[in-house]
């Protein structure tokens, strides 16, 4: 079956997309949060007329500009890679997926680029009020663009508001609001942008702490720390809240991802949440190895988080592959889960029904068209399984998902404590007494980036093998090109992105050292 | 049953995509300007003025490119799937040209930029040279065709479910070897430079730069006009990719694009008016002391490109033809999004005038002063 399709093509295509997305996500979260922090600082300038605030705002804006440019560059590549590397995907779901990208361009990117120009070049040319509004619009534009791309991503995790049209052989949108306001989309948007706010807050605290260590720009640094710590504390609490919402959505919509996040092979009622644990290396779903070398669990917590009930059954990897457990579907109806084999069989029935429908359509046989269409619709929920040939292929990379999840959550909670401590110390005006605390603040910056990347690894590795959950696997989504071609572009991207990252970091450090002008 | 609303929406979206494409070609003056920094700027200060005058506009070109891509994806996803996934090397080359542009303005003059000022200037030059030629070449394939096939029923082939394939191993690079394509690619390159010269004449208040720019007009406007005429006359004479509206079969029709202009006189008028405006603007910049040439040539460019792109898609024409398998050719009917999606997108397009209005307002607010040496001294955010 799919073995005819070059698996290395799929893997290289995934690698290239992952590379671009991860590089893109180095720059975007800072943009999302720093825009608001700057806007708040400029508001202080507008209200007080104190030149100190203007100087502070302009300093952070310089860093914003350096960071923004490279986010733009990587973002362009992401948009076009849907076409260049995932051409089948582009047709199969382009009717739904294209719209958010276009809306993003029209609504958000022009807003960002127009008002960034006013923000950078307008200081002495437009009124203070217009300048302030422009800075706020930059923040709004950045967050709006995040909205649309995250709606698109959420839709891939939970395809809503669409149906399959056998005449065009693709999925078509039937309800825009279901796409935009799907619970997964709302959660994903809020969770992701607040993660950006947290990262930006830590960045601002870290840079400000460095100034305090160097005994420079004391006033600016202290003010920046108070603003960033307040913003960060509120954001990190909200982040935990939306993280809980995300986990609940994953449990409902992507149970395999949840099982991978927890390293849960055998499902159980009243499942505990692994707080700390080490997975057994080389564990496969069908061997008899213990999944964990050791683990410390919070009893019943996973059932509570995933199903809002301490006794709920959480299916494990084995259960999902083998089927046979009871669950409640999206309509509230009790169901018995199919095994992966059964889903694959039904997927093949759906795909064959599409072929038969088209043949009947070519013959003009409307009766047979209706017949095959009914079969297709009945089995469409498993369409993507038809392209798989091994039940095990529905299992994502468990260790990567499991550890990334733990890194993200642990750091997330650490950040809450960090913000609370920093805010308390800053408000008590004692922050400069503790040099170790200032150094910790600097060291927090890379941790924020790690947590942010880990979050996307959980979301994207955890949903494999799906591009569109249950509907289209990566193997059926790629473009028909040589794996060698993708290898070449992968290497070129890796080299150029890395070179630009090095330049960016170097410029950033220099600008920080120069300080506000 | 004919669904006239759907047909209208398909035409409407082809118009929007064409308009974005036309605006993009005009905005490529930024790219053109990037190839002229050292031709026009003999001192560091002069180069700084030139780069800063472009640096305040580059994001519009970039954003228009992104929006063009997004709008094309949303309205004609089969094009996105077939062309981007098939003509892989051309699109990748274009993308590389634009990555290196996006950071160059911001990083060029910053201390500790690792790669050095000249590297970023070289990036800008490559973007201006290769980016424009390749974009023009790629657009020319809308008239000359490419070697690909599309079979949606491949989805039901479990061993190879990919619907579009490119039928040459060159994956798009072959387009640059076709002389007709190349005539447009080079015409776009020289046009971008002409527009850039006119933009500098208008925007930069410096006598030695504008003197050099006016002189350079000769070396760029003449090749542009010649190349454009070659492309346009060739286009009028060549066979085109016509669609039979009853059977949807694609066939070759002599003088198809010429006939399209005759059958759609509004487009003929738009095209002629556009060409006249372009030439008038060039005349203004070359032979009079006017600084307003960029407006005439700019508006003329938008009108000309818009008319040409509409000719490629309207009047039962396949806008992305396949010379490998005529019936795989893409038309605005067989490659578009569903009626529902096009309708949703059309509501979104109502926002476009507001976007244009705020761009115009914001720019008027910060652009009322020309760029000169003094302003460069005082500017806090300088490239």
Image (spheres, rainbow, N blue to C red):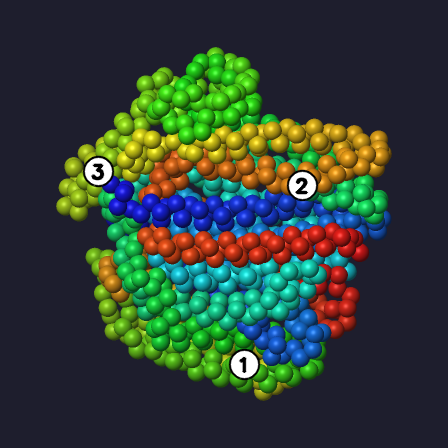
Using residue A68 as the reference point, say whether residue B271 is left or right of it. left
Could you tell me which quadrant the C terminus of chain A lies in? bottom right
Q: List the residue tagged with mark 2.
A: A445
Distance from disc 3 to disc 2, alpha carbons, whole Å, reads: 53 Å
Residue at figure coordinates x 47%, y 73% from the top left: B188
Q: Which mark is residue A197?
A: none
Discs 2, 1 touching: Cβ within 8 Å: no
Pointer 2 indicates a residue of which chain? A
Residue A362 % position (x, y): 17, 47
Tell me, yes or no, whether the two marked residues, 3 and 1, touch with CB atoms within 8 Å. no
How packed mark 3 is, by other alpha carbons closer than 10 Å (few <14, some 14-19, many 20 or more), is: many
Identify the residue at the far top of this view.
Answer: A311
Q: Which residue is mark 1?
A: B282
**Looking at the rendering, which quadrant does residue A298 occupy?**
top right
Please tell me if label 3 and label 1 are on a single chain.
no
Q: Which residue is mark 3?
A: A352
Give the chain of mark 1: B
- From the top left corner, tell me how far across and down residue A475 is, in percent: 34, 43
Question: Residue, x 66% and y 29% (percent of image)?
Answer: A414
Which badge, 3 or 2, is on the more N-terminal residue?
Answer: 3
Q: Nearer the viewer, residue A368 or B118?
A: B118
Q: Is residue B227 visible?
A: yes
Q: CA distance from mark 2 to mark 1?
A: 54 Å
Report whether mark 2 lies on the same chain as mark 1.
no
């Amino acid at each position: 079956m799919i073995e005819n399709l070059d698996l290395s093509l799929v893997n290289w295509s995934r690698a290239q997309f992952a590379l671009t997305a991860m590089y893109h996500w180095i720059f975007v979260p800072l943009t999302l949060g720093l825009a608001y922090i700057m806007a708040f600082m400029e508001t202080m300038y507008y209200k007080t007329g104190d030149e100190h605030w203007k100087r502070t705002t302009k300093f952070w804006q310089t860093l914003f500009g350096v960071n923004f440019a490279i986010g733009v560059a990587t973002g362009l590549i992401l948009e076009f890679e849907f076409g260049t590397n995932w051409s089948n995907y582009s047709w199969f779901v382009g009717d739904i997926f294209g719209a958010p990208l276009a809306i993003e361009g029209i609504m958000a990117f022009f807003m960002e680029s127009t008002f960034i120009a006013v923000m950078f070049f307008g200081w002495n040319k437009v009124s203070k009020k217009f300048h302030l509004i422009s800075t706020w619009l930059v923040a709004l534009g950045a967050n709006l663009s995040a909205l649309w791309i995250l709606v698109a991503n959420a839709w891939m995790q939970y395809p809503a508001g669409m149906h399959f049209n056998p005449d065009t052989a693709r999925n078509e949108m039937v309800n825009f609001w279901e796409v935009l306001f799907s619970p997964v989309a709302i959660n994903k948007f809020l969770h992701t942008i607040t993660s950006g706010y947290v990262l930006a807050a830590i960045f601002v605290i870290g840079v400000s702490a460095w100034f305090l260590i160097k005994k420079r720009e004391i006033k600016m640094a202290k003010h920046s720390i108070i603003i960033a710590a307040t913003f960060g504390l509120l954001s990190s609490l909200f982040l935990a809240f939306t993280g809980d919402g995300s986990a609940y959505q994953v449990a409902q919509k992507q149970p395999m991802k949840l099982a991978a996040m927890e390293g849960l092979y055998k499902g159980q009622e009243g499942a505990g949440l692994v707080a700390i644990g080490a997975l057994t290396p080389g564990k496969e779903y069908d061997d008899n190895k213990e999944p964990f070398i050791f683990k410390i669990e919070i009893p019943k917590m996973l059932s509570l988080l995933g199903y809002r009930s301490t006794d709920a059954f959480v299916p494990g990897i084995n259960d999902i592959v083998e089927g046979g457990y009871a669950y409640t579907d999206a309509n509230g109806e009790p169901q018995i889960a199919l095994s992966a084999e059964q889903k694959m069989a039904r997927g093949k029935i759906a795909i064959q029904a599409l072929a038969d429908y088209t043949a009947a359509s070519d013959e003009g046989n409307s009766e047979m068209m209706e017949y095959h269409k009914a079969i297709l619709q009945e089995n469409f929920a498993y369409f993507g399984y038809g392209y798989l040939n091994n039940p095990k292929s529905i299992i994502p990379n468990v260790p990567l998902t499991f550890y990334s999840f733990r890194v993200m959550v642990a750091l997330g909670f650490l950040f809450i404590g960090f913000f609370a401590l920093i805010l308390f110390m800053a408000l008590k005006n004692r922050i400069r007494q503790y040099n170790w605390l200032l150094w910790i603040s600097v060291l927090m910056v890379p941790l924020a980036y790690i947590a942010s990347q880990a979050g996307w690894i959980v979301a994207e590795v955890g949903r494999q093998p799906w591009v569109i959950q249950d509907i289209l696997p990566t193997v059926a989504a790629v473009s028909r090109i040589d794996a060698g071609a993708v290898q070449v572009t992968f290497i070129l991207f890796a080299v150029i992105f890395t070179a630009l990252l090095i330049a960016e970091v170097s410029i950033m450090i220099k600008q920080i050292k120069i300080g506000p002008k | 049953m004919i669904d006239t609303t759907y047909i209208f929406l398909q035409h409407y979206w082809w118009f929007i995509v064409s308009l974005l494409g036309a605006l993009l070609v005009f905005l490529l003056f930024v790219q053109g300007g990037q190839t002229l920094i050292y031709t026009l700027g003999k001192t560091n200060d002069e180069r700084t003025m030139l780069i800063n005058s472009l640096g305040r506009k580059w994001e519009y070109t970039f954003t228009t490119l992104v929006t063009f891509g997004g709008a094309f994806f949303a309205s004609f996803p089969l094009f996105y799937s077939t062309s981007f996934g098939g003509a892989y090397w051309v699109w990748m080359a274009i993308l590389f040209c634009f990555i290196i542009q996006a950071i160059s303005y911001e990083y060029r003059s910053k201390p500790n930029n690792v790669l050095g000022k000249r590297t970023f200037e070289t990036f800008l030059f490559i973007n201006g040279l290769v980016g424009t030629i390749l974009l023009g070449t790629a657009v020319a394939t809308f008239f000359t065709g490419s070697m690909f096939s599309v079979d949606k029923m491949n989805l039901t082939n479990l061993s190879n479910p990919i619907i579009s394939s490119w039928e040459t191993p060159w994956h798009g690079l072959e387009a640059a070897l076709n002389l007709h394509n190349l005539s447009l690619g080079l015409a776009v390159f020289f046009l971008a430079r002409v527009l850039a010269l006119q933009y500098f004449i208008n925007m930069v208040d410096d006598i030695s730069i504008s003197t050099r720019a006016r002189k350079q007009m000769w070396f760029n406007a003449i090749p542009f006009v010649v190349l454009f005429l070659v492309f346009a006359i060739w286009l009028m004479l060549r066979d085109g990719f016509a669609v039979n509206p009853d059977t949807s079969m694609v066939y070759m029709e002599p003088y198809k694009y010429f006939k399209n202009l005759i059958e759609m006189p509004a487009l003929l008028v738009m095209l002629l008016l556009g060409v006249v405006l372009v030439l008038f603007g060039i005349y203004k910049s070359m032979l009079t002391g006017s600084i307003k040439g960029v407006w005439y040539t700019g508006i003329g460019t938008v009108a000309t490109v818009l008319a040409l792109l509409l000719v490629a898609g309207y009047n039962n024409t396949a806008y992305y033809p396949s010379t490998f398998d005529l019936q795989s050719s893409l038309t605005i009917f067989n490659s578009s999004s569903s009626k529902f999606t096009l309708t949703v997108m059309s509501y979104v397009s109502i926002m476009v005038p507001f976007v244009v209005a705020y761009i115009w307002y914001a720019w008027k607010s910060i652009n009322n002063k020309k760029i000169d040496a003094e302003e460069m001294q005082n500017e806090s955010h300088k490239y």
